[in-house]
Amino acid sequence: MTRPILLQLVPLPDHPALQRVDQYYERVLNDETQPLPDALAQRVQLVLATATTPITAAFMDTLPALRGICNIGVGFDAIDRSHAHQRGVAVSNTPDVLNDCVADLAWALMLDTARRVSAADRYVRAGQWTHEHGFPLSTRVSGKKLGIVGLGRIGQAIAKRASGFDMQLRYHNRRPRKDISWHYEPSLIELAHWADILVVAAVGGDETRGLINRAVLDALGTRGILINIARGSVVDERALVQALQEGRLGGAGLDVFECEPQVPAALRQLDQVVLTPHVASATHETRAAMLGLALDNILHFQETGKLLTPVPYPTQKSPA
Ligand code: 8YV
């Protein structure tokens, strides 16, 4: 009997669960920008993608038998969830398994940007260190004021690590969390005024697009540091570049950008900026766990018709 197709939009490393998935689905690897032969498209029931793969309404409508989209990643802003809802297509992501790795990278960016570790490395490698010429002083992280924009599961993992650095902590969300004792700041601008370091951990998508704008950056100020491990869309990148170039912001540590993998030359030329290529979850352990959870979603869907970690449709409340 012809198995339904699982359309893979990303090459996969080996994983123990793939053997079971292959019992139920024929896996076909294709780029989402390339049309699939009609005879195959008719058989696609599930799509497996990364969190940054654009899954548009037009793409979904090339797959008449589509029943589910499983993301290898926690973000779901690249999926047209309204259209998925209209089509009755279930969507899953891989929450929790990547919280610690993403939080660790947020701290790596904070420490690097404040203490200028990468800049110091470049300085030594360039042979600039001499008896007469020492590396310029940087700024301390311990004991400073940490503001977190978006206290979801990753934001909480970042916040928990602050106690190790004796930092004061406040956060901003659309609404305060009843299960958290940390100080809630209802105003993002006020949080930026208060904070020495502002970490963006909010979900990406239309609701947060351009949330970190010029006014927020100016409130963070000339000695302030912005860290973004969420989505490039959450920060007004043009305003960020201008603030850094004009000295209105002290520094930035960025793992995500508006038009990845393109990073504006203006950002790449700034010495007070630390740049990483969207690697917050990119460890062997975490990517294996993310793939495992995505495959568990597929197997659970095969057995029950439901996904294990479903993403709510836009009209439904997101999980806390
Ligand atoms: C990506 C991420 O999944 O999980 C997310 O939302 O942004 C990352 O973990 C990964 O970079 C693959 O695109």
Image (cartoon, rainbow, N blue to C red):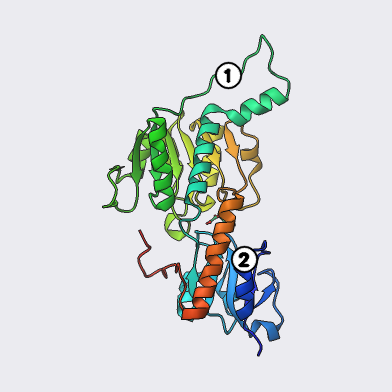
Q: In the image, is residue 71 above or below residue 101?
A: below
Where does the N terminus fall, quadrant-wise?
bottom right
Mark 2: which secondary structure?
loop
Q: Residues within 10 Å of mark 1 (few under 14, many from 20)?
A: few
Name the residue at the bottom extreme.
1
Of callouts 2 and 1, which one flags the residue occurring earlier in the amino acid sequence?
A: 2
Q: Is residue 112 left or right of residue 201?
A: right
* Residue 127 horizontal/vertical position (percent): 73, 20
At horizontal 65% and vertical 50% (from top left) the residue drawn is 262
Q: Nearer the viewer, residue 152 or 38?
A: 152
Res. 171 image quadrant? top left
**Amino acid on which disc 2 is placed:** Pro
**Amino acid on which disc 1 is placed:** Pro
* Residue 150 horizontal/vertical position (percent): 40, 49
* Residue 10 horizontal/vertical position (percent): 66, 65
Kindly report which numbered mark, 2 or 1, lies closer to the viewer in this rendering. Answer: 2
Mark 1: which secondary structure?
loop
At horizontal 46% and vertical 60% (from top left) the residue drawn is 206
Q: Is residue 265 left or right of residue 92?
A: right
Residue 45, can we see it?
yes
The residue beneath circle 1 is 136
Q: Nearer the viewer, residue 172 or 130?
A: 130
Q: Nearer the viewer, residue 297 or 173?
A: 297
- Ligand 1 found in image quarter: bottom right
Q: Is residue 188 left or right of residue 130?
A: left
Q: Which mark is residue 16?
A: 2
